[in-house]
Every structure is written in structure tokens, then in C-alpha cells.
Image (cartoon, rainbow, N blue to C red):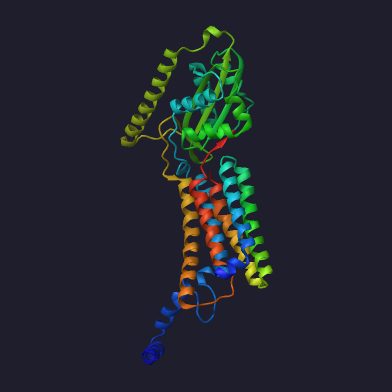
């Protein structure tokens, strides 16, 4: 057996001498597997390679930052948020905390829409606009005479439940959400382009009218929700029609549309998570190959703990896919 | 491998505990991006430090091994940061 092996080895060496490519092919394997003679990890796990992966990720992050300035609306945050779900989850939280449910009010809803549209138009993300307009100005602009009023904002989320959960995790937003000072609420879920990214802004406005008799009835709330749902459908239909029309110039300026699910060309969250998974997965797989091949061949290398590296990478990838969710509250 | 594990069980237990604590904190602060960035820095730094201390205690710490853990710390940081930057 060993004679056969040594004969085969000689043949291989003979082949190599004849054909340089065979040596290259033999060496190529060690980009992925540990080297038996040099007692080192695969070339693609070398220090230089790790530096290269870090640099590549920095470059990709830079591209994702630059692209929206050159091609606005290509990158964005996919979302499927509805006013009905936001209202339901908000009232569930209030009920669980022994508070009365809030009723959807038309004026507060209009005020929330005006605020969201103003944020897209003037490209800001704040409670007070760069021109000094405060949330109360939008509420008063809808002739809503209040004793108490409040505002919560959210952007880049993809689920209604996550929005309410994020507000509940933040002390100041939680205070608004669970305040006994409010009787009514208004929501705006508006899609548009902010800082070059297609996104969805959520505005939540709270209020207690000076005249208690003005509190919205169940009937008013239901008709508002119906209106909200039908406007989403109308917008979707309008977008489809616009897509088939040719030769008409698109209107310049900020684009904002109410409520239908936002589906950008490239969902930036999925894209960045995939980049991380590809790099992390690639390094993790090479490390696993390293363990398998070293055991098989009985190789002992003077390196760090491969198993610890694999464990940490697995934890990082799991955190990225199952824990990190997009969305910011203000 | 098993021998090494038995010999350094305390160090591996520390690493495991740290991973569990970090995982829990990541979940708890999943909507607070500033805290998440801070946790990412802590996570990367702590892993590099763990590796260096572990190899020092084993008596086989070299510049190359220290560099390996520092680079893996950076890799962990960039893997998380590229996502955190856009959520």
C-alpha cells in the first residue's frame, strides 16, 4: 500500500515538473484548507485576508451610504404598517396597563398626515421642523382644541407591532402611550423618500379635546379606518396606472404616498444582513473546514482557538438575523 | 481538544457566560441603536481580550495569536456594524 502511495507520489511530482499548472492547482486548495507543511490556516483565513474582509465591508457600507445621494429611492426600507394594527396594538398596551382605549380622531389623523408630509417635503426627522413648526401647530391647524396633546414618531420599521413595541421600550414614548391624559389618537403612515432612502414615516398624535362632547364616536372611528384602508387601495391602483403611462414627465420634488406596503428596489436591511451573513458565513465555513481537515490529517497548528472563533461568528450571525430589526423612534 | 477544554473550563465558562449576557442585552436593547453600537464595541473588545488572556494563561501567547484575536474582534465589529448602520 505504502509502495503504491510512494509510486503515486513520484508520478505526481513528475507531472508537476512537466506541468506548472498542476502545482498551482495543488496550491490553490490551500486557499481553503490548512497547509500541512507550513502548519498554518488556509490563505483565505490569513491575517491579510481578515483585514481585506473588514475593508470590503467598509467599502460596501460606503456604497450603501453614497448610492441614495446619487440614485434616490433605489435603496429603502420595506414596510407593511397599517393604521388599524397600530391602533389595535396601542390599545392592547393601554388595556394591559389598566387604561381606557383611545378613539381614532379625524382631526388628529389629518394633523399626523400633515406632519408626515411636512417632514418629507422639508427633509427633516424631528418633533420641531427646521422652520420652528411644533407638533401643536399641526394639531391646532386642524381646529382641534385640546387640553393635552402629544406626539410620537417612528421611521424605517417594517411591522406595526415593532413600532408599538419600540415606543413601549423608550421611557418618553411609553409615557405618551400610557398617559391617562389622552382620550383620542391620530395616526399617519406615509411612504416617501427621506435622505435618499425610500421609507415609511409613522406619526402618532394624542389629544384630549377641551370639549368632552367632541370625543369621536365608534361610528366615526370605523368610517375613518375604512377611509384609510380604501385610500391605500386607491394609491396602489393609481401607482399601477401611472406605471403603464408613458411619455409623461414625473413631477419634481419629494414623493409621498399614504399607507400601501413600501417595496423599495433594494431593501437596505436585507441587503446589509446578507452582506454580513455572506462574510461571516464564509469565514465560519473556512474555520469549520480547518477543524475537519486538521483532525482528519492530524495537523497541529500554532494558532488561536478555531472553535471559539466559530462560536462567536455563529452568535453574531444569529443576532443579526433574529434580533436586529430596522426602525428608529423619536 | 477535550483535555484543553477540561484544563481551561473556567475560561470557556467565562466566554460562554459573556456570550449569553451579550445575546440577552442585544435582545433587550434591540430598538436602541446607540446602545447596540456600544455593545458591539464591547463585544469585539472583550473577545480579543479573552483570546489574549486565555493564550497568556496557556503560556502560548505570541504576537501572531494576539493579532489573530484582535482581527477577529474587528471582524465581529464590522459584521454587526454594517447592519446597525442601516437599521
Front residue (pair B59, A209): B59
Say left or right for A201 vs B16.
left
Above-or-below relation of A249 to B22: above
Q: Residue at x 59, y 75 (%)?
A: A302
- Examine the rendered structure and indicate whether residue A306 appears above or below residue A101: below
Image quarter hosting the C terminus of chain A: top right
Question: Which image quarter: residue A25?
Answer: bottom left
Numbered label tally: 0
Q: Residue at 58% of width from left, 34% of height from top?
A: A169
Residue B51, percent across and down?
63, 64
Q: Is residue B48 left or right of residue A201?
A: right
In the picture, the quarter occupied by the N terminus of chain A is bottom left
Residue drawn where x is 65% and y is 68% of the image: B55
Place of residue A116 in the rendered image (x, y in percent of width and height, measured from the top left):
52, 28
Q: Quadrant of residue A309?
A: bottom right
The residue under the point 49% across, 78% down is A298
- Residue A79, image x and y in percent? 44, 37
Amino acid at each position: 500500500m505504502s509502495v503504491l502511495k510512494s509510486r503515486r507520489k513520484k508520478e505526481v511530482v513528475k507531472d508537476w515538473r512537466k506541468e506548472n499548472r498542476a502545482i498551482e492547482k495543488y496550491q490553490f486548495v490551500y486557499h481553503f484548507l490548512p497547509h500541512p507543511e507550513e502548519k498554518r490556516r488556509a490563505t483565505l483565513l490569513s491575517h491579510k485576508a481578515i483585514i481585506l474582509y473588514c475593508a470590503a465591508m467598509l467599502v460596501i457600507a460606503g456604497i450603501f451610504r453614497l448610492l441614495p445621494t446619487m440614485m434616490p429611492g433605489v435603496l429603502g426600507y420595506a414596510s407593511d404598517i397599517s393604521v388599524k394594527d397600530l391602533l389595535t396594538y396601542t390599545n392592547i398596551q393601554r388595556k394591559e396597563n389598566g387604561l381606557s382605549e383611545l378613539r381614532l380622531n379625524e382631526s388628529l389623523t389629518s394633523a399626523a398626515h400633515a406632519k408626515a408630509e411636512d417632514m418629507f417635503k422639508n427633509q427633516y426627522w424631528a418633533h420641531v421642523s427646521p422652520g420652528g413648526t411644533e407638533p401643536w401647530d399641526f394639531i391646532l391647524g386642524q381646529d382641534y382644541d385640546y387640553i393635552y396633546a402629544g406626539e410620537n414618531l417612528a421611521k424605517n420599521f417594517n411591522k406595526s407591532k415593532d413600532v408599538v413595541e419600540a415606543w413601549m421600550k423608550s421611557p418618553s414614548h411609553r409615557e405618551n402611550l400610557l398617559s391617562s391624559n389622552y382620550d383620542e389618537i391620530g395616526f399617519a403612515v406615509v411612504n416617501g423618500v427621506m435622505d435618499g432612502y425610500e421609507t415609511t414615516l409613522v406619526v402618532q398624535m394624542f389629544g384630549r379635546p377641551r370639549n368632552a362632547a367632541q370625543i369621536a364616536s365608534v361610528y366615526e372611528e370605523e368610517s375613518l379606518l375604512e377611509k384609510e384602508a380604501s385610500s391605500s387601495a386607491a394609491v396602489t391602483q393609481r401607482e399601477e396606472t401611472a406605471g403603464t403611462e408613458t411619455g409623461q414627465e414625473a413631477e419634481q420634488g419629494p414623493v409621498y404616498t399614504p399607507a400601501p406596503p413600501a417595496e423599495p428596489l433594494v431593501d437596505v436591511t436585507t441587503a446589509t444582513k446578507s452582506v454580513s451573513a455572506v462574510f461571516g458565513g464564509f469565514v465560519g465555513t473556512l474555520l469549520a473546514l480547518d477543524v475537519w481537515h486538521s483532525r482528519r490529517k492530524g495537523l497541529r497548528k500554532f494558532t488561536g482557538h478555531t472553535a471559539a472563533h466559530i462560536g462567536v461568528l455563529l452568535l453574531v450571525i444569529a443576532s443579526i438575523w433574529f434580533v436586529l430589526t430596522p426602525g428608529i423612534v423619536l | 481538544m477535550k483535555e484543553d477544554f477540561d484544563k481551561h473550563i473556567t475560561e470557556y465558562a467565562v466566554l460562554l457566560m459573556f456570550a449569553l449576557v451579550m445575546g440577552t442585552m442585544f435582545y433587550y436593547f434591540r430598538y436602541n441603536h446607540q446602545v447596540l453600537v456600544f455593545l458591539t464595541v464591547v463585544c469585539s473588545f472583550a473577545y480579543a481580550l479573552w483570546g489574549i488572556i486565555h493564550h497568556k494563561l496557556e503560556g502560548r501567547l505570541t504576537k501572531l495569536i494576539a493579532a489573530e484575536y484582535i482581527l477577529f474582534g474587528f471582524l465581529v465589529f464590522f459584521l454587526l456594524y454594517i447592519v446597525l448602520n442601516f437599521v
